[in-house]
Amino acid sequence: MTPTTLDLERGSFCGYRYYPEALRDRAWPPAGRSVADEFHLLLVDGNLARVKAVVAARPELLAELLPVVANPEASINVRVGAGVLFEIHAGGAALRALVPRLGALSAHGDARVRTDACHYLGLTGDLRARGFLEARLADPSAEVREIAADGLADLPAAAL
């Protein structure tokens, strides 16, 4: 999705307020910045509503929040904001499409990343999440084991 000339003239796109002269003839996000970087900056600034609006319009962009999940040093407001968006999309196609990537994150070296990945895997409601979650039941971290067990309990009965 790129802004139209009218969007730029009005100074807005997907709820963002921009200076039209600075963005004329440019696509969003700004050149040199990825969608993931733009989402990160918005969440740092507490602009969850803006990220939510973009992801609502383009659910496939939910994947652009995975770098937040993968970063154990991400600030709490960024991690919480990403978590809210994953929860909004619980059981949806956009989150289910992330099962393999979340599964890979469930084996990350940092327990915080594994914990979050297990939580989001449980939210997918996808049968493919089962193997990733079962593998974490033997995790060295008690918190990861607990969240993995909760995630398994959240999967549909057919998955068990």
Image (spheres, rainbow, N blue to C red):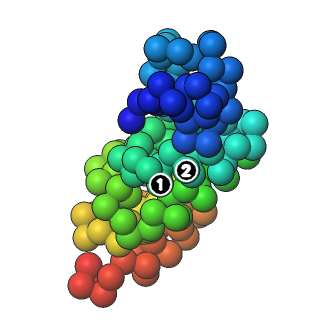
Query: Could you tell me which residue is drawn at 44 percent across and 29 percent down?
Result: 4
Q: Is residue 147 visible?
A: yes
Q: Quadrant of the N terminus?
A: top left
Residue pointed to by mark 2: 53
- Given residues 24 and 149, the one toward you in this image is 24
Q: Position of residue 93 (x, y in %)?
A: 31, 61
Residue pointed to by mark 1: 56
**Contact (CB < 8 A) between labels 2 and 1?**
yes
Query: Could you tell me which residue is drawn at 55 percent across and 50 percent down?
Result: 53
Q: Is residue 119 visible?
A: no
How many marks are shown on the rendered structure? Answer: 2
Q: Please, what is the three-letter code of the amino acid marked with disc 2?
A: Ala
Q: Quadrant of the C terminus?
A: bottom left
- Given residues 10 and 87, the one toward you in this image is 10
Q: Residue furthest bottom?
A: 157
- Given residues 58 and 104, the one toward you in this image is 58
Q: Position of residue 96 (x, y in %)?
A: 32, 60
Left/right of residue 68 with respect to residue 45 in the rendered view: left
Label 2 vs label 1: CA separation?
5 Å
